[in-house]
Image: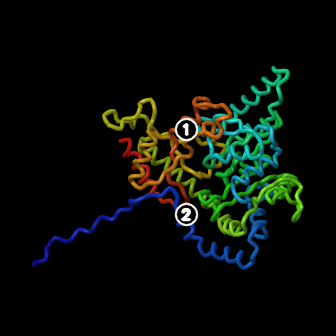
Amino acid sequence: MKPSSTPAIAAPITATPASVPLLDLGRQYASIREEVLAAIARVCDSQSFILGPEVEALESEIAALTGASLAIGCASGTEALWLALVAAGVKPADSVITTAFSFFASASSIVRAGATPIFVDVDPGTLNLDSGLVLKEIQDRRLRERAAADAQPGNIRAVLPVHLYGQCADMDRFGRIAEEFGVAIVEDAAQAIGAGWNGRAAGMLGVTAAFSFYPTKNLSAYGDAGIVTTRSPQMAEHMRRLRNHGSPRRYYHDEFGWNGRMDAIQAAVLRVKLPHIADWNQQRRQHAATYDRLFASSGLTSAKNSNPTSARTVDQSAVPVRLLARSPQAKHVFHQYVIRAQRRDELRQFLTERKIGSEIYYPLPLHLQPVFSHLGLKAGDLPISEQAAREVLALPMFPELTEPEIRRVVESVADFYS
């Protein structure tokens, strides 16, 4: 057969990824594998598996990172929240104000401390706990107490703001609330390692702060782990006892605590990762800026994007995609990149079919969870949280994410609304 005089055309090379995961921990592991394995071997060689030198070293390093003078390692972020609340003085019959739009542990830790959560709605822009509504809640309760001669004090002992998705809540206003009403501010900083507010790091913005090192977090262990920061030596010593069955020395117990000790292997892994956290957080901020730019150029964040002839026409009174507000005082670490989307569930299914990961944080506000039905709140009581639960969608976000992957995500969202 005579060969064709027409040269063969090579298949086009494309940088478009076939799929985009919500999170890929394997990429990070590949970059630090030898260091991690060496750290684990160091613990195994030491035969010191619970607390010990590795945990003590991590505590010192986290204290230095946050600017808090003390840190107490523990078994999980949930354990950290409980320790932080109890050390801050929360007791049975107390109440703690917190957000309705958070992970369950924010509220369950209050209950575990013996207190009652008071759910307050969130700021419509950032979705963080609304400090103005918190102030109003405290003022209204104080007025009701004065009006009823036989009323028992409300015992609002603390406020637990959550630094949602890696952006600090309005800690200036919460600080003023603490001063005026004598309540403790306890930071739920589970998603906010490396974040800050007005030049101060998360972890030193309240009397105590709880961090999580769950494997999906910005600074992640290879199992469960958490830490609490404080500037109070008395609180720190109390938490060290509480995490170890309330024991100041072996086999002697001054109070009821819990087995909340940190594994040395988790501390060793975290110590390998800790020197990278500033760079990893900066990469997350760069990815967020890329998302912002691509969403803006696509027209998705503008009402003029709506196509009145399309079968997927969106309500002209709302844009297809809204970005969460960013506080100028906040140093955001983008634990998640979250949008608010019209027809969110349909969009998520569309992305799934294109092999693009996403997640809903959170689909049901805490005040509507069945376990809290005894508090008497119902649908419509906290409308901002409820609307957010219908609209939020977390898109792929991790340091090793690439611009072609981000571009594919945004183009796919645009395809859905076209």
Q: Which colouring convention does the figure follow?
A: rainbow
SS of the residue under disc 1: helix
The quadrant where residue 160 appears:
top right
In depth, the one of 159 and 412 nearer the eye is: 159
The amino acid type of the residue labelled 2 equals Leu
Instruction: Locate residue 380, reporting x and y percent.
Output: 58, 29
Residue located 58% across and 33% down the image: 384
Q: Please indicate, yes or no, whether residue 310 appears anywhere in the rendered image.
A: yes
Instruction: Locate residue 268, reporting x and y percent.
Output: 70, 69
Question: Which residue in the structure is indicated by mark 2?
Answer: 25
In depth, the one of 327 and 388 nearer the eye is: 388
The quadrant where residue 346 appears:
top left
Where does the N terminus fall, quadrant-wise? bottom left
Going from N to C along the chain, the mark reached first, 2 or 1, is: 2
Mark 1 residue crowding within 10 angstroms, few (<14) / some (14–19) / many (20+) = many
In depth, the one of 222 and 402 nearer the eye is: 222
Q: Which disc number belongs to residue 65? A: none
In space, the residues marked 2 and 1 are separated at their CA atoms by 28 Å
The amino acid type of the residue labelled 1 equals Ala
Instruction: Locate residue 13, reporting x and y percent.
Output: 33, 65
Q: Is residue 214 left or right of residue 2?
A: right
Residue located 21% across and 71% down the image: 8
Q: Please indicate, yes or no, whether residue 301 appears anywhere in the rendered image.
A: no
Q: Is residue 86 left or right of residue 131?
A: right
Residue located 65% across and 77% down the image: 38
Q: Is residue 413 left or right of residue 360?
A: left
Where does the C terminus fall, quadrant-wise? top left
Q: Which disc number belongs to residue 388? A: 1
In depth, the one of 143 and 181 nearer the eye is: 143
Taking 48 as reference, is 20 above or below it?
Answer: above
Instruction: Locate residue 178, reporting x and y percent.
Output: 79, 38
